[in-house]
Amino acid sequence: MELHVKREHFSSDEQHPNRARMLISCPDGPGIVAAVSRFLFDHGANIVQSDQYTIDPSGGMFFMRIEFDLPELERRMEQLQAEFGEIAGQFQMNWKIFNVSHKKKLAIFVSKEDHCLVELLWQWQAGDLDADIALVVSNHADMKEYVESFGIPYHHIPVTADTKAEAERRQLEVVGEDIDVIILARYMQIISPSFIEHYRNRIINIHHSFLPAFIGGNPYAQAYRRGVKIIGATAHYVTEELDGGPIIEQDVQRVSHGDDVGELKRIGRTIERVVLARAVKWHIEDRILVHQNKTVVFN
């Protein structure tokens, strides 16, 4: 029996069609907040939230996230961006403005373990992930029927050592240029540098450790043999350094000598699914700024 899941909810974004978000990073100095606030005021915008952080007021980097409402945002967005360029140049800013009503498009990559994928689908179905899941890509066909029951396209692209280059070519083809973020929901393949470069700081991975201490196969068996007292998970952006990209979110839970490998896996999977879902939510809400190999997360 085929099940089609219908989503009926109204997100906060749909209730605020003229809302935008601005992300800024630049060398710190006097007048940044005043200049941005004045610019928005002069254009008739109302600031509804503002967060800022500086690494060091004397020569460090400054980071800012602003949400604002602007009447007729859709029509005025292009002009707003063009005119803000003058201020951005004055303060050497890296910046972006996002129209909140334009939902981000997600592509999820998965292998055989389904717990992270299921969590994302549940949160999406409930409206807690205010984005569009455009497609799921997998090197296995196991979850095809389940994913398609949500009305989401499922692309089965097998990967072997001999076909990896061709498989990545097909992946790039099905993902396309419109995807805002790729989520590796326990996708057990190494991503090539050329693929990473195509989606720089737009690929989120979940790693099965608070720190990348247990590499290779059977990480929870390794943890059990070491007698660990804390297990956790790390969500991070993917870089060429395996499991070494900018960290977005982490969490841990205490375990004891009485927890066998199966129990460690169960606890670990729960942490993984929660940590990954948080990281994805913060990305689609434009809460993350990347600086070198670290992140500033306004949450």
Image: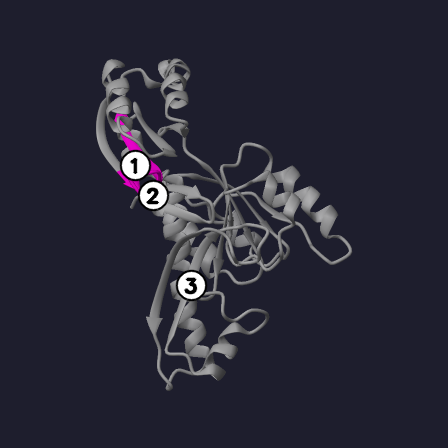
- Please state which amino acid type lies under the numbered disc 3: Ala
Farthest residue, direction front = 58
Q: Are marks 3 and 2 in contact (CB under 8 Å)?
A: no
- Residue 39 shows which numbered tag? none
- The x and y percentages for residue 232 are 40, 67
Q: Nearer the viewer, mark 1 or mark 3?
A: 3
Q: Nearer the viewer, mark 3 or mark 2?
A: 3
Label 3 to label 2, Cα distance in Å? Answer: 24 Å
- Please state which amino acid type lies under the numbered disc 1: Ser
Q: Secondary structure at mark 3?
A: strand
- Please give left or right for residue 100 compared with residue 240 in the image: left
Q: Which residue is mark 1?
A: 11
Q: How many marks?
A: 3
User: How busy is the neighbourhood of tag 2: few (under 14 within 10 Å), some, or many (20 plus)?
Assistant: some
Is 101 magenta? The answer is: no
- The x and y percentages for residue 55 are 33, 44
Q: Residues in magenta?
A: 52-68
Work out whether residue 223 or residue 61 is closer to the camera in this orientation and state it: 61
User: How busy is the neighbourhood of tag 1: few (under 14 within 10 Å), some, or many (20 plus)?
Assistant: few
Is 67 magenta? The answer is: yes
- Please state which amino acid type lies under the numbered disc 2: Gly
- Residue 127 shows which numbered tag? 2
Q: Are marks 2 and 1 in contact (CB under 8 Å)?
A: yes
Q: Give the dominant element type of the magenta stretch: helix, strand or loop.
A: strand
Earlier in the chain: of badge 2 and badge 1, it is 1
User: How busy is the neighbourhood of tag 3: few (under 14 within 10 Å), some, or many (20 plus)?
Assistant: many
Farthest residue, direction bottom = 258
Q: Which residue is mark 3?
A: 233
